[in-house]
Image (cartoon, rainbow, N blue to C red):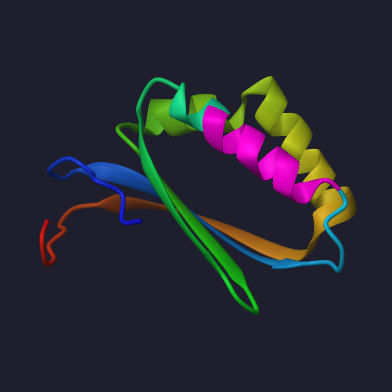
């Protein structure tokens, strides 16, 4: 589903990953993190896709909101587990969205 975001500017956290084999609790934690993110002040939405690589983009209303999410204690635990158990490789990119457009927007 395409996230319904407000008029720019807003911010995007682009998380690209290659997973290790096996679930090892990943799906349960992923569901938990999504529910937690939805409750965070400044959260605007999320989009995710996975094939050979996974890409998750979360949208935030301010740099402060995404910094708060990055330092959330439950999210910090998930980040550590990701490094230890789930990801072979990953990259995080932060971007300011200055323009957006599309069909049925």
Which residue is at 61% across, 35% downward? 33
Q: Position of residue 17 (x, y in %)?
A: 65, 65
Furthest-bottom residue in view?
A: 52
Q: Point out the image quarter for the N terminus.
A: bottom left
| Residue 40 image point, x, y percent | 46, 22
Q: Is residue 73 above or below residue 11?
A: above
Q: Could you tell whether 48 is left or right of 83 in the image?
A: left
On-image quarter of the C terminus: bottom left
Asked whether 39 or 82 is in front, the reply is 39
Residue at 55 percent across and 37 percent down: it is 34
Please state if 25 lies on the left or on the right of 33 as rendered: right
Q: Is residue 8 magenta?
A: no
> Which residues fall within the magenta stretch?
25-35
The secondary structure that most of the magenta stretch takes on is: helix
Residue drawn at (23%, 44%), measured in percent from left and top?
5
The image quadrant of residue 89 is: bottom right
Q: How many marks?
A: 0
Residue 32 as seen in the image, left or right of residue 96 = right
Q: Nearer the viewer, residue 22 or 93?
A: 22
The residue lying at 38 percent from left, 49 percent from top is 12
Residue 61: % across, % down: 30, 33
Q: Is residue 10 above or below residue 84?
A: above
């Amino acid at each position: 589903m395409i996230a319904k975001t407000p008029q720019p500017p807003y911010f995007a956290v682009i998380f690209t990953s290659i997973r290790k084999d096996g679930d090892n609790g990943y799906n349960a934690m992923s569901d938990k993190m999504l529910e937690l993110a939805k409750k965070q002040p400044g959260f605007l939405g999320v989009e995710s896709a996975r094939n050979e690589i996974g890409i998750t983009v979360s949208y935030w209303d301010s740099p402060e909101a995404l910094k708060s999410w990055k330092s959330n204690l439950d999210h910090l635990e998930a980040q550590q587990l990701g490094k230890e158990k789930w990801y072979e490789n990953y990259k995080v990119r932060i971007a300011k969205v200055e323009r957006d457009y599309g069909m049925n927007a």
